[in-house]
Image: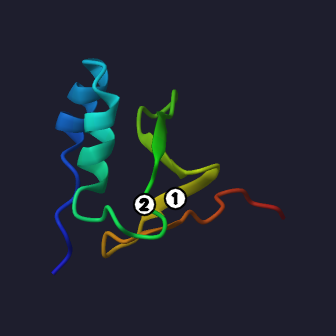
Amino acid sequence: MPEQKMDQILFANLCRAGKFKEALNLAIQGHENEKFTPSRFAMDKKTGVPIFYRGNKRVEPDETGVWQLAKSSKDWG
């Protein structure tokens, strides 16, 4: 059974209210002690979707909700 996804509307509302720590805590809830749990995030200006980082490396949850290093989306060919 896949894990429940983060509440996108609540996340966006927290960001609009300037409660960025609370928004990050919502995103990592239940996965606080994983190796690649994000320490910060930025909002993509084009899509409005959060981009999560651990240090200077981009991370994203896999299909089970475990945080992993993000796969590069650049096409080098």
Q: Which residue is mark 2?
A: 37
- Outermost top residue: 17
The amino acid sitting under disc 1 is: Val
* Figure quadrant of the N terminus: bottom left
* Residues under numbered marks 2 and 1 in contact, where contact means CB atoms less than 8 Å apart: yes
The amino acid sitting under disc 2 is: Thr
The x, y position of residue 15, in whole percent, is: 31, 26
Between 37 and 76, the one lying in front of the other is 37
Specify the quadrant of the image occupied by residue 62. Answer: bottom left
Left or right relative to 54: residue 20: left
Structure colour scheme: rainbow
The x, y position of residue 47, in whole percent, is: 46, 34
Q: Which residue is mark 1?
A: 59
Left or right relative to 55: residue 64: left
Point 29% across, 50% down: residue:
27
Specify the quadrant of the image occupied by residue 33. Answer: bottom left
Element type at mark 2: loop
